[in-house]
Amino acid sequence: MNKKIVFVLALMACVCLSVMVFLFRDLFIPPVSVTYRNMTDLTDEYNADKEIAEAHSKLRSSNEKAGVISGIYGGQRNIAITFDGLSDRTTMLKILDLLKTHNLKATFFVDGLQTVEDPQAVVSINKEGYKVENYTLSGIPHMEQLPPERMVRDFCQAQKIITVTTDNKANLLKCNNTQYTDAVLLAAKACGFNGVVKSDVVIDATIPGAADGIAGRVRPGSIVSVRLEVNPEPIVLEPEVSNLRPEIDKKPGLKPLPKVGDNKNKVIIATVEKVLVDLKNANYTTVYVEDVAKTRVAAAPFDKLTVLLSALRDEVEALFSSRTAFAAEGAPVHPEEIHTILTAERAMSFSFGGLSDRVAVGDILNKLQKMDIKATFFVTEQEMRRYPDTVKSIIRNGHEIGVSMRANPPETVAEARKELVDLRAFLRNQFGVTANLVRQSSGAIPDTTKAAIAAENCVLIGQAYNIVQSKHKDYKSPEQVVSELFGQFDYAFMRGQIIYFRLDFYTDNTLVGKVMEMVKKQRVDNIAFSTVYDNPQINPKNDTQMEIKPIGAILSNKQEQYTIPVDKDKIPHNLRSGAHTFTVNDSNFIEAARKRYLGNFEVDEGDRIIGFSKMSIRRLDKTGTVHTNDNVIFLSFDDWGSEASLNKLLYVLKKHNATATFFIITRTVPPTSNILRRIALDGHEIASHSDLHKPMAVRDPKTGRQIPSQTREELYADYARSYKVLEEITGDVIVNGKPSLTRLFRPPTLAISKQGFEALFDNSYEWIVSGSYSTKDYMAASAEEVVNNLKYGIYDKHGRLQKGATIVMHMGDATKYTAIALDILLTINDRKADSDPTKFRTGRLTDYLTADYDQSKPFKPLK
């Protein structure tokens, strides 16, 4: 009996000892912490103290662990795609565009710090309908090395930031290169995550060739993760810190610039596109990781009740949420935040906030005065009360004033509206200024604020670029800052964009002014057409310089503004999507192709043509020349470009009163729609070069044979989508009685196929125009080379004008000599006497390609 008592007592002692070790395990673990990226903007809206305390309590009282979600292999060819981390906003928008183009689902795991730095990128992901989940606070690797309490703080802080930014809680957690130990799973569960995600295949998008052979590495049911930004910061052993804000007197050393190649963003885009295309070509369909999670988590017995209660709670919250109350209050439609004003005017805006640093404000005002720029300054009530002299100085300098609302939003529309009314009244009473431009200081903008702004007939303002970012706080030179702001494809700012600078952030309070000057030089001034013989400084008629105006000044120019989509009633009936102007069937297909195809001498039976019989190929046009006796040629431009390239081309054409046809790849147009609108308003023709720029025929590298790159259905969808984009932006533009939108099409790489023609005709494209001669300007080494190529396409070997020649040029930023060469050639032509038989004029293709025109009958030219 005594032995049994001793055994029981010993057992009880062991149990007590184990419990004490678990509860007080931090005493036995050396403190470990993380060197986080600098983040000073964790304002009250991001305060997660309450959530952290609740999670700590759960961690101490429960042994429940989150489930590990990985691939579920089965017979269906379903996969889940995730993107881990964030790249720059331009790259993110292109990734969203690729997903939309290929109609694929994806889950984005975003970290908290990158979300703070660029909340709009995360808002764009959420707005497009993709899932946003938690990638921890900074995406650091090897989180299993942290004590559970530190993990809880990290997870909760990131969750708070994501919730504030998207208005939705992340359901899933993913840790970068981390072993999911019991400690990690306990911490994740305590923070409210039922599942943590483990990838089956990980692709580093920053490494060229990382996606090679991806289809062979993936099994049905896999979770495929594309890592956009790899966080290089390891976990560093150092004393525990109490919060993420740096000490006031702490003077960190200069942060070294990351050694990133200039082509990193290009590599990311190429890698992502290859992953999406290869997986789709392998007949994989995509599901959200959340759908995988539901299946996997439901299998964990201890989580069934939690999932049920969570779903019930969400339903109750949705039923009684404040969004329902807004509708009951009869609030107006919530206005969208304006990042880029929809305008064809060649103007953009600089905006500023943060007036507490008087040195920075004074420096900016001096620099703006020297550059003759008027800007928009957003002021808070606190700034108006504390720094009235600063506000008066801004007004005296002729700048525009807007009001800035608190980042911590009111709970009701009435409270938000009262805040806005009081703000505007204070500004009006103290400074005599009435403002209707409103900005929120930071964070995602709730519906309460949007409804209040709409109710007061004000305009909600955001920014296309947030220049001042937290990671640059202690940088010393503008070169350091600017080198990290823009991606490789950000050649220039676009008309209508709003650029935001915060004045009270950099440690060096003169840095923001230097950054503004450099940004203007590199991203604004570079759009002007400036040569030794013609630049805005010596030629007053050269109006190519981008104007920087206050936001209100651009908004007041209603004549240049438009909507997307444009008013359908203003689009001519024959140009509306779905309108059929002619019918093609099997019996008349070849005749229609011969009549409506203007070919090219390089495209023949052995190169870039499939689906036609040998007899049909011989009967198709190979000249690309419009049949006419007029001394007319046709200028055309392919692809798409930035403000820097397109603005120069428009100036040269306007300078010489020339017209052209722009054959546009539409997949990247929406962010730059303003310049497309300008092209149409200048009287040029708008035509399609497809949406994805996939040739109708490509050469199989193994067999050497011509094969299609898309199915007929994919071709049809591509061409329909392309026309829709052009229609929604330019369909209502009519200049001198002639619509700018056309039903002309130029095949990518000039390759053609029978099924491609069928898809075009079914989409009511009327003419397929390859062109008589390509200048190859994208590979030219000098302007002289492009001039000579233009002459070769316009004149024959005897110097005679080739009437009806259709010249193919390009409008991308790689074609840096095209505008100058075209200016030289057109200047020479302008100086010729009207009686000179070699003098030409430029024409509109649609003036000649009329219903009774037939390319297969060259002996009946039209005037």
Image (tube, helix red, strand yellow):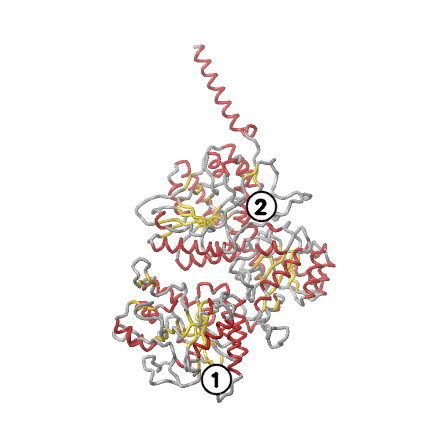
CA neighbours of label 2 inside 10 A, class few (<14), some (14 to 19), many (20+): some
Q: Name the front one of labels 1 and 2.
A: 1
Q: Point out the tag, 1 or 2, that comes first from the N-terminus.
A: 2
Question: What residue appears at the point 33 percent right and 71 percent down from the top-left corner?
Answer: 761
The residue pinned by badge 2 equals 37
Amino acid on which the number 2 mark rests in the picture = Arg
**Amino acid on which disc 1 is placed:** Lys
Viewer-proximal residue, 863 or 172?
Answer: 863
Q: Position of residue 35 (x, y in %)?
A: 58, 41
Q: Residue at x 44, y 56 (%)?
A: 270
Image quadrant where one finds the C terminus: bottom left
- Residue nearer the viewer, 179 or 304: 179
As drawn, which residue projects farthest toward the top? 2
Question: In which image quadrant can residue 715 be found?
Answer: bottom left
Horizontal side of residue 234 vs 591, given as left or right: right
User: Which residue, as the protein is rendered here, is positioned at the far right?
Assistant: 389
Question: Callout 1: helix, strand or loop?
Answer: loop
Residue 548 occupies quadrant: bottom right
400 lies above or below 216: below
Which residue is the site of mark 1?
839
From this view, report whether residue 497 is shown above or below residue 316.
below
Q: Give residue 316's position: percent from left, percent from top.
A: 47, 47
